[in-house]
Image (tube, helix red, strand yellow):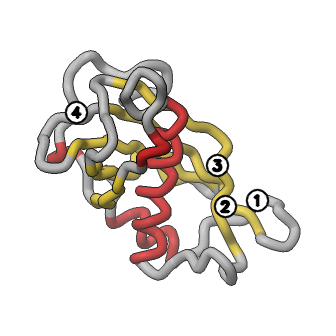
Amino acid sequence: MSDDTFPAKSETRSGFRHFASITTRWADNDVYRHVNNSVYNGWIDTAIADYLVKEGVIDVSKSPVIGFVIENFCQFRGPVSYPDVVEGGVRVVHIGKTSTRYEVGIFKEGIDEAVAVGYLVHVFVDRATQRPQPIPDDIRAALTKISV
């Protein structure tokens, strides 16, 4: 996945380092009987949060430094419908001083090829001031673990 466009080639599970299981909801389907495009960005955010919380580097209610989403993108490659279960595969492709870029593949449970691919950029900020902060060492270490 590049900054401007995603390659036409398929993305498979082997390219991702962490997987979060996500259950679709009845309300996710739109009038065309597939999951509405707006839901995918929530899945991307959820897969990343799942990793950071499970690694113990983000406490959503107490961490002094938190990640703000400043950019995201999703490209759709196949349909998903309720009651499918999907998995968000996460990898880190850039770690800067105050920001990081994740890439996420959305996979139907048990299927190797992604039905959607996207990216999300976090800028880490002080919770109180909401000003950018250097990525704390524990978060940096967790990001490095899934970096490609």
Foreground mark, 3 or 2, reads: 3
In this rendering, position of residue 22 left or right of residue 43: left
Q: Which badge, 4 or 1, is on the more N-terminal residue? A: 4
67 and 61: which is toward the camera: 61
Amino acid carrying label 1: it is Pro
Point 40% across, 51% down: residue: 92
Residue that label 2 marks: 124
Q: Which badge, 2 or 4, is on the more N-terminal residue? A: 4
Whether label 3 touches label 2, CB < 8 Å = no
Q: Residue furthest right?
A: 129
Q: Which badge, 1 or 2, is on the more N-terminal residue? A: 2
Amino acid carrying label 3: it is Val
Whether label 1 touches label 2, CB < 8 Å = yes
Label 2 Cα crowd, 10 Å radius (few <14 / some 14-19 / many 20+)? many
C-alpha separation, residue under disc 4 versus residue under disc 1: 32 Å
In this rendering, position of residue 97 left or right of residue 105: right
Residue that label 4 marks: 11
Residue that label 3 marks: 69
In the rendered image, residue 137, in percent from the top left (x then y), is placed at 54, 76
Q: SS class of the residue under badge 2? A: strand
Residue that label 1 marks: 132
Q: SS class of the residue under badge 3? A: strand
Residue 74 to residue 98: above or below: above
Whether label 4 touches label 1, CB < 8 Å = no
